[in-house]
Image (tube, rainbow, N blue to C red):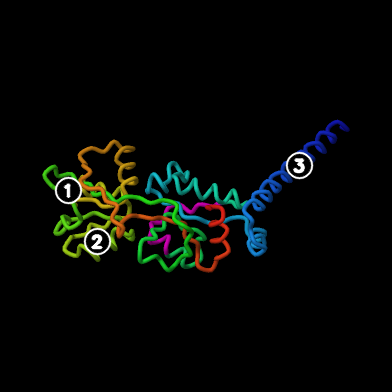
């Protein structure tokens, strides 16, 4: 029996040392970030932040088998780790629902926020962490698209709530918008003949097409038009300016 209790005590010492090391690592990270007293005080009071995980916006933010994945997901995990924070990803809601959640304080961080003018007013923004060209994909081999004006009068599939919807409504009012909840559904709208073209970020459309081995779609136009280029940042709920500053320092 004495040997048993000796082992138990040893295990307790190991566990205590391990936990101390974890806290020390986070403290060292905090020192590296040069956090202000207010930021350090905030970190002591908060250990977990809630962030948006979209179900189908690869390669930036998506979910496979219940696991959040993508560039934006990995980036936020890295920033949170540098600050000594844990991230709880909220999966399932659509984009418009996520916007309502962060307005209501049910979400701390909204990923993939398009900062193209007019910048959203419902979140505090970090610097941009990605910039993406806009693509137009079609299925009709005879349909020629070389500029956005060529979309006039066509049925254009876009993701509901995304900046592409706002742009098309403002600049191409003669087009018929086919609004879908996800980008994959917008792509399928073209493949199924319900839309003539899909407009969205090139990396996202290209990823979905390649990963799902979709055929029959053709890249008709690629644009870095400043009005439509997606510059994305991390959005933080309006009443958490200290969290925004913490993530900005980690991002820098």
Which residues lie in the magenta part? Answer: 87-99
Of 252 and 16, nearer the camera is 252
> Observer-nearest residue: 188 or 71?
71
Q: Nearer the viewer, mark 1 or mark 3?
A: 3
For disc 3, the marked residue is: 17
Please name the residue that numbered disc 1 is placed on. Answer: 193
Q: Where is residue 191, by image quadrant?
A: top left
Instruction: Let me know if residue 97 is in the magenta part.
Output: yes
- Mark 1–mark 2 Cα distance, whole angstroms, equals 20 Å
At x 42%, y 54%, the residue is: 112
Q: Under tag 3, what secondary structure? A: helix
In the picture, which quadrant includes the N terminus? top right
Vertical comparison of 145 with 123: above or below: above
Q: Which numbered disc, 1 or 2, marks the residue closer to the eye?
A: 2
Residue receiving disc 2: 168
How far across and how far down the image is residue 36, in percent? 64, 61
């Amino acid at each position: 029996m004495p040997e048993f209790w000796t082992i138990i005590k040893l295990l307790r010492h190991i566990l205590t040392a391990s936990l101390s090391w974890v806290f020390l690592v986070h403290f060292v990270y905090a020192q590296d970030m040069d956090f202000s007293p207010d930021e350090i005080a905030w970190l002591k009071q908060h250990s977990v932040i809630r962030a948006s995980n979209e179900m189908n916006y690869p390669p930036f933010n998506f979910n496979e088998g219940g696991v959040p994945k993508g560039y934006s997901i990995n980036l936020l995990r890295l920033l949170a780790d540098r600050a000594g924070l844990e991230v709880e990803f909220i999966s399932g809601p659509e984009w418009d629902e996520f916007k309502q959640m962060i307005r209501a304080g049910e979400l701390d961080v909204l990923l993939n926020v398009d900062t193209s003018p007019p910048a959203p007013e419902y979140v505090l923004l970090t610097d941009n962490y990605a910039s993406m060209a806009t693509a137009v994909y079609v299925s009709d081999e005879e349909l020629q698209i070389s500029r956005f004006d060529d979309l006039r009068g066509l049925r254009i599939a876009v993701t509901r709530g995304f900046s592409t919807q706002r742009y098309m409504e403002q600049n191409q009012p003669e087009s018929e918008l086919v609004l879908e909840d996800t980008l994959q559904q917008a792509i399928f709208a073209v493949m199924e003949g319900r839309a003539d073209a899909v407009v969205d970020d090139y990396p996202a459309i290209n990823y979905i097409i390649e990963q799902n081995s979709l055929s029959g779609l053709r890249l008709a136009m690629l644009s870095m038009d400043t009005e439509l280029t997606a510059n994305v940042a991390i959005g933080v709920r309006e009443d958490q300016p200290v969290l925004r500053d913490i993530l900005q320092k980690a991002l820098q």
